[in-house]
Structure formats: structure tokens, C-alpha cells
Image (cartoon, grey):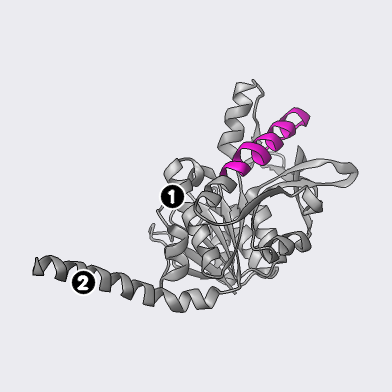
Amino acid sequence: MKNLELKISDKLNNKAEILMETLPFMRRYTNKVIVVKFGGHAMGKKEYIKSFAQDISLLQQVGILPIVVHGGGPQIGEMLKKLKIESNFVDGLRITDEATIDVVEMVLCGVINKNIVSAISTEGANAVGISGKDGNLISAKRLSIIDKNSDSNLENIVDLGFVGEPKKINTDIIQALINQKMIPVIAPIGIGENNLTYNINADTAAGAIASAMKASRMMMLTDVEGVLDNKGKIISELSLKKCKELLNKNIVYGGMIPKIKTCVKTVENGAEASVIMDGRRKHSILIELFTENGIGTLIKK
């Protein structure tokens, strides 16, 4: 019996020590805005969503101001398949015609947004789901990309349809919700001229919101540990200058390139720092914020 009591006492002491270790980090982020981009495979399983919701709820309860921006590419793809609408991509961006934008808005603003709100609310926090169209939260403009033909060296502007990029963020809407102790859960749908609806990449939307809100952190939850060096080891911290060197030397490639570019732009435009991290890891947000070394790649000035 005495040995059992000692084991219980040791376990409680260890928990107390962990709480004491996290206290300085909680103080650091008290009343600070943390923008979390949640999407991709990080939101593909119930256990990932539950862990994410628990983390977001805890942030609010310890005095931090979380804002969630979510994607939904896989879910949109599944719905388009069911409706027999073909999907085409250019540089990872879905070409979005009139039929597709209706589906995108329905999936993002309906099923996904409300599921995330419900998950956070179940964990004891107050969350409200909105889209970038509500209150002109995200004013958008049409996004065009340049496709350079390597054979002819000609540059062609690719029409992506109703794919947009943020032009202006209405921070008053977000601040009003925060002032009411609500967690904004934002679907990345923007509103353009003539009330046109635009599909916006969730990383891009999260970065623009983090910059506009002068966030302490923009946390990009992905399917990888973070940025890797040329030996495949995770890089724990990068300056903006080093990020640009990695891009110029082609050390990073594929889907990591736009993520790094978004993080750099986010910091340059007003956020304190950005983090690229694995959102599939249980309680990844808490580990990144409340431990000395975190788990992802921190990008800052």
C-alpha cells in the first residue's frame, strides 16, 4: 500500500512540475492572438479533430485568443466526385468554375465549418462559425497565375475561375467576436466586386488574417513535421533571410514552397512569427506553444 501511495504521489508531483514548466509560456501568450490553420489530412480523422478542439479550448481557457481558419480540399474533392464534377488543378490550386464554387461554399461553410465549431464547443469553449463573406470579412480579388512554357519561353496567364486572394481583412468583425469571448472559426471564402464569391487557399487566408491581426503566431498545421534540410532533418527555426536562401537554392520543393512563401509574407506583413508543423500529432498546438523547443519549424524576422 505504501509503495502504491508513493507511486501516486510521484505521478502527481510530475504533473505539477509539468504545469509549472508551462506557466511562463502561458504568460507569454496571454491576451495574444494565435491564428491556427487547420486542414488537409490533419482534420481527416475524428481523433485529430478531437485533439485539435481540446487544444483550442485550452488556449481560450488560459487567456489566449485563438482564431481558426480551416480548409477542406479532400472533402470538397469527394463531394465533386459524387456530383460528377471534374476537378482540375494548376500549381495545387483547384480551377473553380460556377458549378464548383457553389460546391466549395456549401462544403466549407456548411459541413466542415459547423463540425469544427461543434467539436470546439464540446470541449467547453465558445466558438462561432463564419465565412469570409460575412460582414465583408475577407474582401477578395481574382487570382491569376503565370504559367511559363519552358519550350517556347512564353508566359501565359492561367484563368483559375473563381479562385481569389485576400485584398483586405475586416479585423473589426474578428475583434468583435473575440471581445465577446468567442473563438472565430473562419471558412476561407471571400467576397469580391459585384458580390462574386471566391475560393481562397486556406493557408493564404490564415496568413492574411494573422498579418492583419498582428498575431503572435500563425500556426500552419500540415501533414509533415516541418521544414527539412538537405539531409532530411527538421529545421527548428528559420529567419526570413534563411527561408529565401532555401527557396533560391531549391533545398525545399513541392508543396512546401508555397507554405514557406506564405509564412514569410505573413511575418513581413505584421505577424510576429509563423510555424509549420504536423497537425496529426496529438496536442501538437500545446506542445509547440508551451514547451521550450516546440515541434515544428518557427519562421520569424
x 76%, y 63%: residue: 171
Q: Give the answer, above or below, for where 144 lies relative to 268.
A: above
Residue 139: horizontal and vertical position, in percent? Answer: 81, 52
Amino acid marked by disc 2: Asp
Mark carried by residue 10: 2
| SS label for mark 1 | loop
Q: Nearer the observer, disc 1 or disc 2?
A: 2
Is 97 contained in the magenta span? yes
Q: Which mark is residue 280?
A: 1
Position in image of residue 98 (x %, y %)? 78, 30
Magenta: main secondary structure = helix
Place of residue 175 in the rendered image (x, y in percent of width and height, measured from the top left): 72, 64
Range of residues picked out in magenta: 94-115
Mark 2 residue element:
helix
Q: Which is nearer the eye, 203 or 79?
A: 79
Quadrant of the frame with the N terminus: bottom left
User: What is the residue that sits farthest to the right in this orientation?
Assistant: 194
Q: Which of the numbered marks, if any, corresponds to residue 8?
A: none
Left or right of 228, for residue 13: left
> Nearest the camera: 48 or 101?
48
Position above or below: 209 against 64: above
